[in-house]
Amino acid sequence: MKCLVTGGNVKVLGKAVHSLSRIGDELYLEPLEDGLSLRTVNSSRSAYACFLFAPLFFQQYQAATPGQDLLRCKILMKSFLSVFRSLAMLEKTVEKCCISLNDRSSRLVVQLHCKYGVRKTHNLSFQDCESLQAVFDPSLCPHVLRAPARILGEAILPFPPTLAEVTLGIGRGRRVILRSYLEEEAADSTVKAMVTEMSIGEEDFQQLQAPEGVAITFCLKEFRGLLSFAESAHLPLSIHFDAPGRDPVPCLGQPSSPLRTLCWMATLSWPHSQSQTCTPRTWAPQSSTGQCLSCRLPAHPTWMTLPVMTLTLT
């Protein structure tokens, strides 16, 4: 595999890596005929993200040499992130970036061509792995929210960085409400806890297809990571979700886009005896298949509901 990224697309690639680093500790790199795929999943398998860079994104793209099988590899996220650590440096000094996979030496070679003829070469060791792929069906998403990333980015600014989960729901007047989530023990204790709530009008959304009373609770860290990339690229963000406790649901970008982004995150489940307007209480059980992270993620009944965020660069 060999590809060449030039101009402003080098910084876009770097921002994508920064976004993925906020989700998982390992990066799954897979060159495909329809583009270069960068994937990651967190340690608890509750969040998964995939960036697919189409051949149009690159000045040159070759998935494999003639007669060679397509390679896929897994490397430490920290190692790959070190190449794109400084986004300011990428924008000011890097003119192009060449990425190649060497199967014989088990090395991923990333070469940055900087101004004044300076070249920086990074040789990163990798491991062969199976394809990391989430399994889901887009038709299973009855609720859809679509808005500029800037709107949602400003909405989560008041929430403290240490907040683990946030609840998103549809309130009266079809207003979208973001509210900090408290564990049952904290909510019932005598210690007063600060609760932050933001309300966004329906007019700020490009699409709002969800009834009043629907709500989901999910991790805020991974959501911030996606928003940081979407805001920097001025992309709209689509959130597809179902009622808590259902199977995984999907999200894909437009086929003609040079960059497609897919991400899903597990949500907190609610006891069956409660209505959908009740506050979520406990996590749904994790998958008990015992598969390693490099294996295909199954659509298993014990998986938690997944609200899906879609970013499409046009």
Image (cartoon, grey):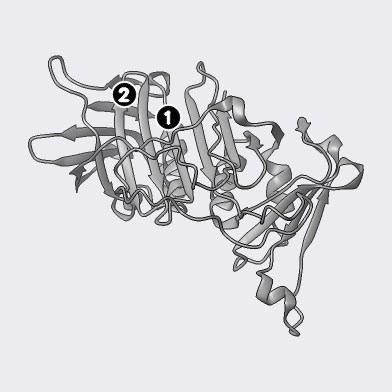
Q: Quadrant of residue 210?
A: top right
Is residue 62 shown left or right of residue 86? left
Sequence-earlier tag: 2 or 1: 2
Q: Residues within 10 Å of mark 2 (few under 14, many from 20)?
A: some
Q: Amino acid at mark 1?
A: Leu
Task: State yes or no: discs 2 and 1 in contact (Cβ < 8 Å).
Answer: yes
What element does badge 1 sit on?
Answer: strand
Q: Of the numbered discs in the image, which one, if any, rests on residue 32?
A: 2
Q: CA separation, marks 2 and 1? A: 9 Å
Can residue 149 be seen here? The reply is yes
Residue at point 32%, 51% (across, down): 290
Q: Amino acid at mark 2?
A: Leu
Quadrant for the C terminus in the image: top right
Q: Which residue is mark 1?
A: 52
Residue 263 placed where, x, y %? 51, 40
> Against 256, is 131 above or below?
below
Residue at point 35%, 48% (across, down): 289
What element does badge 2 sit on?
Answer: strand
Can residue 7 be seen here? The reply is no
Is residue 135 shown left or right of residue 244? left
Residue at point 43%, 50% (across, down): 287
Is residue 172 shown left or right of residue 274? right
Q: Quadrant of residue 105?
A: top left
Q: Residues within 10 Å of mark 1 (few under 14, many from 20)?
A: many
Quadrant for the N terminus in the image: top left
Residue 116 placed where, x, y %? 29, 39
Is residue 208 shown left or right of residue 72? right
